[in-house]
Image (cartoon, rainbow, N blue to C red):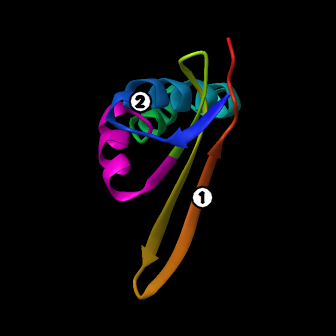
Amino acid sequence: MIIRNANENDINQIAILAQETYTQTFGDEMSPEDLTKALKTRDEDYFSQAIRTEEIVVAELGGKIVGFIQFGAVSYGNIVRARLKAWPFFVT
């Protein structure tokens, strides 16, 4: 397994992994409309922007992205917090 910084070529695989794991984790608890909205924040457009403004590290196995972690800052008015999103490894 290789752990490395994500690059533009990884965006498609990261988005697929994020949407699959989110759907498996939360899909049964949400309405189809809410799930569709939530998945928009995990699509290629989202990660195309996020890869420029945040740190994303991927775990790669056999040329396939099997996990990633996303680091960034979140602001609420004058309060800044660190944010960490860890997505589980997903091997098919």
| Callout 2 amino acid | Asp
In percent of the image, x 49 and y 36: which residue is there?
34
Q: Is residue 29 visible?
A: no
The nearer-to-camera label among 2 and 1 is 2
- 65 or 26: nearer the viewer: 65
| Callout 1 amino acid | Leu
- 68 or 79: nearer the viewer: 68
In this view, 75 is above or below 52: below
* Secondary structure under the numbered disc 2 in the rendered image: helix
Q: Which residue is mark 2?
A: 10
| Cα–Cα span, label 2 and label 1 | 19 Å
Q: Could you say which disc has been placed on residue 84 in the image? A: 1
Q: Which residues are magenta?
A: 42-56
- 28 or 78: nearer the viewer: 78
The quarter in which the N terminus is drawn is top right
In percent of the image, x 53 and y 58: which residue is there?
71
Q: Are marks 2 and 1 in contact (CB under 8 Å)?
A: no
In percent of the image, x 69 and y 18: which residue is there?
91
